[in-house]
Image: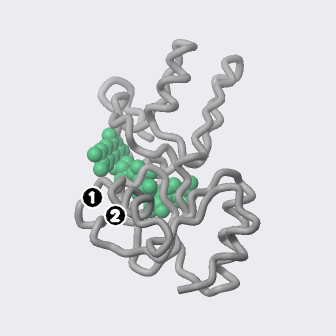
Amino acid sequence: MADFSPLKAILSGSVILKSENEKAYQQEVDETWNAATRTRKPDAFIRVATVEDVANTVKFCVQNEREMCVCAAKSNEFALADGAVVIDLSDLNTVTVDVERKVVLVGAGAKVGDVDKETARHSLVTSLGSYSELGVTGVTLLGGTGFFEQIAWLFC
Ligand SMILES: Cc1cc2nc3c(=O)[nH]c(=O)nc-3n(C[C@H](O)[C@H](O)[C@H](O)COP(=O)(O)OP(=O)(O)OC[C@H]3O[C@@H](n4cnc5c(N)ncnc54)[C@H](O)[C@@H]3O)c2cc1C
């Protein structure tokens, strides 16, 4: 197990270790959708609060030769791995709608439901997945089906 204290000292978010906070650690594990993934035992969860946190965590992992996982809504089996440092993006969930340009700026940890809630205020929609608890980045990287495929052949 690496010494996470140098990372803790510069992070705005939090480092969650099983040895220090078993309840928070277990909560992170239990948030994964896939029951099989819940048996995995990452070394740490890094609940990042800023983009700088992400950069600092990646630097820390590279310097300490630690395997990394990235997760947002934890719906996919790749969200956790044994012995890994898991970068949990779920607090980076801002959504900004530019109505004039019809462009949505989405934080790396935002969920489909976060985006739908904001775009609906302006009577706009996107072609993301149909399940609102999915992560937007995850569905963009690994998904492919949504409500719009049936009416306009649009996929995420
Ligand atoms: C109940 C359920 C319903 C689903 N419904 C649909 C659907 O309607 N349409 C559809 O197309 N798919 C659907 N899927 C599949 C889903 O889109 C994929 O599993 C998707 O990858 C989930 O993303 P996530 O953020 O929720 O999960 P995560 O496990 O957090 O992330 C998924 C993958 O993306 C990577 N990742 C996430 N965020 C980032 C980031 N910011 N930068 C780099 N890598 C990142 C992770 O490392 C991981 O490999 C469904 C899955 C489930 C379990």
Taking the spot 59% from the left edge, 48% from the top edge, the residue there is 108
Whether the residue under disc 2 has CB within 8 Å of ligand 1: yes
Where does residue 131 sit, x and y in percent of width and height? 33, 37
Where is the C terminus found, in terms of image quarters? top left
Q: As rendered, which of 101 and 153 lies closer to the eye?
A: 101
Residue that label 1 marks: 34
Taking the spot 65% from the left edge, 86% from the top edge, the residue there is 64
- Residue kind at label 2, given as amino acid type: Glu
Q: Cβ–Cβ below 8 Å for labels 1 and 2? A: yes
- Residue kind at label 1, given as amino acid type: Asn
Can you see residue 142? no
Taking the spot 39% from the left edge, 66% from the top edge, the residue there is 78
Label 1: few (<14), some or many (≥20) within 10 Å? Answer: some
Where does residue 113 sit, x and y in percent of width and height? 44, 32
- The numbered dot on residue 77 is 2
Quarter of image, res 63: bottom right
- Circle 1: element type: loop
Q: As rendered, which of 74 and 3 lies closer to the eye?
A: 3
Where does residue 118 sit, x and y in percent of width and height? 55, 23
Label 1, label 2: how far apart the Cα atoms are: 7 Å
- Dot 1 or dot 2, earlier in sequence: 1
Whether the residue under disc 1 has CB within 8 Å of ligand 1: yes
Where does residue 26 sit, x and y in percent of width and height? 37, 62
**Above/below status of 112 relative to 85:** above
Taking the spot 43% from the left edge, 64% from the top edge, the residue there is 25
- Circle 2: element type: helix
Question: For this view, does 1 lie left or right of residue 132?
Answer: right
**Above/below status of 67 relative to 32:** below
